[in-house]
Image (spheres, rainbow, N blue to C red):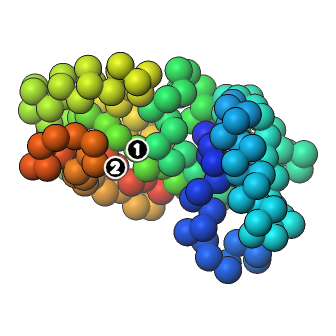
């Protein structure tokens, strides 16, 4: 399941392997984005992909449990993201995996093995994204690490395409965890 999957653009990263998956759900609250996803599904000929206008904190697929759940730059837009992660835990099968990639800012005092962002970076990016109802949280990373067994965790920086200064980069993380 791709929670907050919007237009379904992430499915192309699977390539031909998507046809080997039993069932894929793109879940989002924005019907207009899912209309684009439905067209993408139709154009690609995928018979195993469905969309669902639903909340990431409550959606349960018909078969009630899944092998993998992803949040791709969507967790920062879900108001009750704690509930979304908890719900993912409940819906995942034992041994199932969660994959998250999203913008974030570190805690003031992060775990020793994690990156510590400056006061300026933590506060600037939080304010910058809030105007678009995107909330990079210092609590995503620690909560994911507590809830799931980390399989992969990377902290990176990326250039923001619409931002005027190419040297000012936004932090993001990649997390794969196992239930």
Relative to 89, say whether 57 is above or below: above
Query: Where residue 155 sits: x, y (%)?
Result: 27, 52
Relative to 57, say whether 93 is above or below: below
Q: Can residue 114 be seen in this view?
A: no
- Image disc number at residue 102: 1
Residue that extends furthest to the right in the rendered view of this protein? 62
The quarter of the displayed image where residue 142 is located: top left
Q: Given contact means CB atoms under 8 Å apart, are the residues at marks 1 and 2 in contact?
A: yes
**Residue of label 2:** 173
Residue 49 appears left or right of 86: right
**Residue pictured at 44% horizontal, 22% vertical:** 133
Distance from disc 1 to disc 2, alpha carbons, whole Å, reads 6 Å
Q: Circle 2 — which element?
A: strand
**Residue pictured at 12% horizontal, 43% vertical:** 165
- Image disc number at residue 35: none
Query: Where residue 139 sits: x, y (%)?
Result: 36, 29
Upstream in the sequence, badge 1 or badge 2? 1
């Amino acid at each position: 399941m791709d929670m907050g999957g919007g237009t379904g653009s992430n499915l192309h990263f699977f390539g031909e392997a998507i046809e080997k998956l039993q069932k894929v759900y793109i879940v989002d609250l924005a019907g207009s984005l899912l209309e684009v996803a439905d067209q993408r599904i139709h154009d690609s000929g995928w018979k195993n992909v469905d969309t669902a206008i639903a909340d990431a904190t409550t959606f349960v697929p018909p078969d009630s449990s899944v092998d993998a759940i992803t949040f791709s730059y969507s967790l920062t837009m879900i108001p009750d993201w704690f509930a979304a992660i908890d719900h993912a835990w409940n819906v995942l099968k034992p041994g199932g995996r969660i994959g998250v990639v999203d913008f974030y800012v570190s805690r003031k005092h992060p775990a020793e093995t994690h990156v510590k962002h400056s006061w300026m970076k933590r506060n600037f990016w939080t304010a910058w994204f809030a105007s678009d109802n995107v909330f990079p949280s210092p609590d995503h990373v620690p909560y994911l690490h507590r809830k799931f067994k980390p399989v992969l965790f990377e902290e990176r920086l990326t250039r923001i395409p619409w931002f005027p200064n190419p040297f000012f980069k936004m932090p993001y993380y990649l997390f794969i965890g196992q239930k």
